[in-house]
Image (cartoon, rainbow, N blue to C red):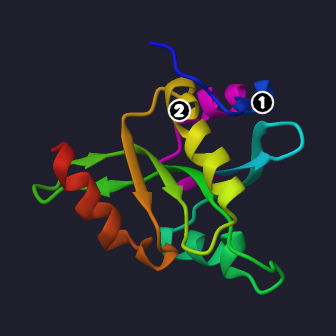
Amino acid sequence: MCCLAVCEVDGSLKAKLDKFRFRKETNNAAIVMKIDMERHLIILEEEYEDISLDELRDELPERQPRYPYRKPTFIVYSYKYVHADGRVSYPLCFIFSSPMGCKPEQQMMYAGSKTLLVQDAALTKVFETRNTDDLTEQWLKDQLAFFR
């Protein structure tokens, strides 16, 4: 299946996402990506190991005072999910955060590039939020409840 992409995915980021998909660690981890607006390229912004969703939320650029405006963010999050019956799984979740107040051109570039990134990384658990305050463990558990 093909899609029209506004931005391509950087080759080194594709390799990193492939490696991340098959990681053996059992802790929560994240890859945060951004768009290089000049090159129209999705690139790595930051990697995190052993990080809760609450901690990750606080690390996002829009939540840090040195950033003058909000910006969209792509996140791939490996989550240790303990089911109600005690089973443990490690879903790979794609989270697209596009907060209110983003520049319209950025919002369009991110929205137009999301599908290609999801396809390239072969992600099936795809979630969106307009408010990064939503990014809590309970929010993620609620989202994952549909995939039982």
Residue at left 48%, top 53%? 95
Specify start and end residues of the magenta stretch as a single range: 14-31
Q: Position of residue 77 (x, y in %)?
A: 51, 51
Question: Is residue 121 rendered magenta in the image?
Answer: no
Label number found at residue 115? none
Q: Is residue 95 above or below residue 121?
A: below
Q: Amino acid at mark 2?
A: Arg
Q: Secondary structure at mark 2?
A: helix
Q: Is 84 left, or right, of 24 in this rendering?
A: left
Image quadrant for the N terminus?
Answer: top left
* Residue at far bottom of view: 65
Label number found at residue 10? 1
Earlier along the polypeptide chain: callout 1 or callout 2?
A: 1
Residue at left 70%, top 33%? 16
Q: Position of residue 24 (x, y in %)?
A: 52, 37
Q: Amino acid at mark 1?
A: Asp
Label 2: which residue?
21
Q: Position of residue 129 (x, y in %)?
A: 43, 63
Can the viewer see residue 124 in this picture? yes
Q: Is residue 120 above or below residue 45?
A: above
Q: Is residue 22 above or below residue 147?
A: above
